[in-house]
Image: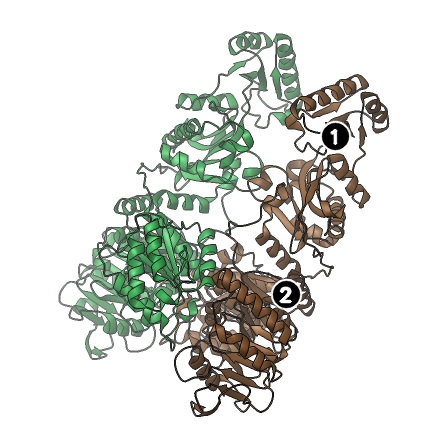
Chain colours: A green, B brown
Amino acid sequence: MDLKKLLKPKTVAIVGASEKAGFGGDTTRNYLKFSKNLDNLYLVNPGRDSILGQKAYHSLSEIEGDVDLVILCTPQKTILPLLREAAEKNCGGAVVFASGYGETGAEGKALQKELVSEADRLGIAVMGPNCAGFANFVDGIFAFAFLVEERDRFGNIGMISQSGQIVLGGLDSPNMGFSHVISSGNSCNVKVEDYLDFLVEDDDTKVIAAYIEGITKPGKLVETFRKAALKKKPVVVLKTGRSGKAQELAASHTGSLSGADKVLRAVFRRYGVIEARDLEELCGLAAAFSWLESLPKGQRCVFMNVSGGEAGVMADLADEFGIQLADYDPETKAYLQTLVPDYGSVNNPFDMTAGIGYNTPVMVQAMKAISGDEHVDAICIAYTITPKIWDDTISHMVEAVSIARKDPDMKPVFWIPFIEHSRHQESADILRRAGVPLLPSGRYGCRILKQILDFAGFDFQDTEAAIPEKNHKISRGLSEYESLNYLKDHGVPIPPQAVAASADEAVLKAADLGYPLSVKIHSADIQHKSDVGGVKLNIKDEANLRAAFEIVMDNCRKNAPDANLEGVLLKPMLRAGVEMIIGVNNDKDFGPMIMVGMGGVFVELFKDVQLAPAPLTKEQARRILENLNSYPLLNGYRGNPVCNKEALADLLVSISKMAADGKDSIKELDINPVFVTEEGVSIADALLIQYEDTF
Amino acid sequence: MDLKKLLKPKTVAIVGASEKAGFGGDTTRNYLKFSKNLDNLYLVNPGRDSILGQKAYHSLSEIEGDVDLVILCTPQKTILPLLREAAEKNCGGAVVFASGYGETGAEGKALQKELVSEADRLGIAVMGPNCAGFANFVDGIFAFAFLVEERDRFGNIGMISQSGQIVLGGLDSPNMGFSHVISSGNSCNVKVEDYLDFLVEDDDTKVIAAYIEGITKPGKLVETFRKAALKKKPVVVLKTGRSGKAQELAASHTGSLSGADKVLRAVFRRYGVIEARDLEELCGLAAAFSWLESLPKGQRCVFMNVSGGEAGVMADLADEFGIQLADYDPETKAYLQTLVPDYGSVNNPFDMTAGIGYNTPVMVQAMKAISGDEHVDAICIAYTITPKIWDDTISHMVEAVSIARKDPDMKPVFWIPFIEHSRHQESADILRRAGVPLLPSGRYGCRILKQILDFAGFDFQDTEAAIPEKNHKISRGLSEYESLNYLKDHGVPIPPQAVAASADEAVLKAADLGYPLSVKIHSADIQHKSDVGGVKLNIKDEANLRAAFEIVMDNCRKNAPDANLEGVLLKPMLRAGVEMIIGVNNDKDFGPMIMVGMGGVFVELFKDVQLAPAPLTKEQARRILENLNSYPLLNGYRGNPVCNKEALADLLVSISKMAADGKDSIKELDINPVFVTEEGVSIADALLIQYEDTF
């Protein structure tokens, strides 16, 4: 659906315009106060001839020309007739503030369905219902129902929120300047994904800040994220639900660890979408990207302080948040040493002392020297933004930063205060004009700085997403033999295996496979083979094989009387190594997700797993392995040989390709364990659950 | 040393008083501006008869009566003569701003040593040198060298800092009110521990905030912490050095994981000292304790929001920071349901909706109902403190909180804003007067709330600290046999063991011990027995024992030709179980620290260890076990039997008592592994390193 008439209308009508408090009055007053062009605004109210000094129309029909956008401040029951009347004026967009729809139970849901269907029929893109409206600061359209503080809010942040209050929080934040602010409300026929797409395409928007409660168009979302990643436009998302207890449960190991919320976060990582965990992070990240003129070219930072104590605090924070401290070139260090007094020393974090910090020109020189050092990618000043006191330190520093930034070669500069509530708006405004992001205090600032550095260095790997096309319900589990054969047929290497229906056949097959081998019951009906006595390991010769065959079959006849026993599965004993688990869980929205972790307690107790959407490139496979806390176990831990991680990455790639191809046929896959040795990888067991309707 | 004349002087002289900028002028102006009683102030300057309208003295000697405190604004070389002159006036305290001492290398260190010795001789408690001075807001003494913003700073926070800039940060924080603020500088003959002790004893101080760089009097520190814990006076400490690379290395496992910084944090936990990780946490915690009129009686919180979106953000944050959400009594819930509109629902976090949040009397009723619920211990309002906008929501809410708090039965109420930099001082001041801590935003606020709840519930276990009395240098490792016997002799149960110098003797001893058993080389010179072929396990009979004896001895003669071989150590094979490591590392400052963790990768890779000072009570032993991430492994993991955790706790207690008794004889102890089963515990191996000079 085209959002142009909704978000960038040429002509606007406020229906229910008024002078009184409430949606009609507040929206009218906001529009008159904050919008740019009042010539193409029509105020509509059946009972009024003029409102707040503006001519009023008694109905939409009374307006002479077309109306692109109607802002409906009227109650729920008036909405459909008004939309029909608006359609007559070639209207393409409507803002509906009214509540009483999807948020209120069955009756409201039916009304919303009717609204969607009628709006679609009329070709009107509806924002809301139950929303706070929007503000387009680029073209000067202020269709927003809540009153806000008066200040200039124009900038380059595009903000979307499913909560009106959170939009207000953004609008009230003094360091945020916007291209567009959108409160999407119930998102009836225009979804949050559609607004995101609009903002990704919008050249007036440099950074996107989104508060999201739920996703309804995963394919569109992923495609939008992909476009943003290709443009390197930062998308910051706050998504609640990390603590949700209502996550999908799945039968296999993989499922239990990758609920829908974790899936969405894995999708974020794939596209370099920046995750904010609360409003301070959402607004802080958006403002920082908005102020920053160019991204750092690398990760190496220098922190500049005016106190040994605060330099120590910064060192601990940098370490905690994984911010890389630059090592100066010896020449830089020698030069800086000439700027500090005798008692000072040049470190990173760098306690500039009063010698530099209280002296504007000297601080400019110091910043230029540090920026000119090829071992440095960014500078961060760490000092609390207090109101000016008698000694004026803050003014010296802010002025120095502002002057230094005029040097066209100056690398990106950030500012982190130690205690935020003392912020000083005058200093903030100077820094903003100088393109120096003033981050929130301490820990918030460090995390945001780290996220910006990571975004700057993000190497997007463009692969086609595997979004399922159908919603499948019925599934069935394959036997181990069938599961492994499925892998083999789809390009995933597996060790040799054979099934045998009799002891004689087992002996024949064993001759090909070679001893020692394992004997397991072959039955699609038995998933936990050991529990029913269906496994015998390390069988070394024919006599033992015959005995094992009988024991396994007898046990299963006794312990699983209803199972259809097809014989036994024979496999050569594998050389043990580091045990890994690899899983696939096909998310109904985002498709097959690859899960990988070390076997046993590492996954279960320490939750040390990585999750990523299929398919994976080799580089992505390497990265998720390296992100495991238990990665050192693969890397020659305690004198053990270094495992063949390239083979493991190749295996992940082949499984991920199979999973992507199987986006409409594979429900779950649990490979447990995979043995990884210095030579390579071997899959010891697999359980595949397939959608029944794809057979 | 008595600090009374230093910190609570009756008469004060500023030496080097002046009108000019600099230490003398700034201190004089500060004193005249912020101090309460100018009658007992003497301004001293050899060249002036009056300063800023006050009479000036040419020297200390010229003053008629006694001078309790001298504030020396003069350069380093004048300090000693001035102290001597001051002593003649019965002076007991001096503030020395001058630098050029311990912070500047060998010469400065010598000067500081001389200063300490002379000050001690004269009986003068010196603050500094190289400090910013202090302010005593209770008695109105403002001996502070840096200029600060003009506002009322009186309150009940006692702040000490080894960094002048960090003191300034506290003084400039608009929500901090102080009893005393102390910049201790180089801490020559009065140490940070002495000031802490003063503030713990001081009845005008309700909460202590300390920035500490180093500890010099560990015994005093611990005794001070103990006094604070017994009084339940909160002590908040920011200590840099978490990332320090200069930590002590120790040979054994324990040592490598418990560097000095971790030791200090274990000491903090023992005494309920609250750790701040940066300045926002330090100031936020101090202000919160300062404003709070009483501590919560339990952990169960209700969050009140005015937005579904923000309630979701709060739920995620509460979960992340471990804040317990209260379950309402059904009656409370039913009552609250009558207050919200039809579309609202009563949850926790509770989206009050405009129906409550925009209506002062209704919000007061809601708060009273929630506070009256016996399942609730505290209320937290989560709303951004914006300046008043046209609709006045913030005023309604702040007013409601203020009214509700007048109810003498109202439980503690906190306020967490979502975006801090929009704070509104007028609202903050109302909340402060109402005893409602306004916490820093989002994540900071949640962590601080959690720390306050934990402090409120902290169950201090008073035990005598085991601070070493001597500094030991030389040590020697005991053999496994000797180490285990040491444990046995000091009340720690060990399995049976015997040594044998010949195969015949081994056979004799084995008859008592019983087969199967292990044979290990017995030599204090061989620590890694397996590496030299010095171990044979699971010996089942006499013939194998004789063979094992010869093999072990031969291997060691060959592979460790210089070792003194005393024979073999025989021990019955132990029943394997969950493998734990227990260690003792005797910190030179704080004495024996108990370390416990699961064996292998849990300790090494996941750093899943707990550290606590010896001795431990049974309850403390239980707690450190429960704090292990791998604790579920002891608790019937994956169908295994539940381990005997009481026996393990008893073992920890007995080891900790031995360690405390051995504070001047045990250097390190590494027990690895201890097997824990459903029956009990058994120590399989131990290595003790003893101080040589205690033999």
- Residues B277 and B475: in front is B475
- Name the mark on residue B522: 1
Q: Which amino acid does label 1 sit on?
A: His
**Taking the image as drawn, is residue B493 in sight?**
no
Look at discs 1 and 2 and give the one toward the viewer: 1
**Residue A319: image x %, image y %?**
46, 51
Is disc 2 on the same chain as disc 1?
Answer: yes
Q: Can residue B475 be seen in this view?
A: yes
- Viewed as shown, does residue A208 lie left or right of B615? left
| Quadrant containing the C terminus of chain B in the rendered view | top right
Q: Name the residue under label 2.
A: B456
Along the viewing direction, whichever of B313 and B95 lies nearer the viewer: B95
Q: What element carries label 2?
A: helix
Image coordinates for residue B430, horizontal then vertical, percent: 49, 79
Tell me which amino acid carries mark 2: Ala
What subunit carries mark 1? B
Mark 2 neighbour density, 10 Å: few (under 14) some (14–19) many (20 or more): some
Query: Which chain is home to disc 2?
Result: B
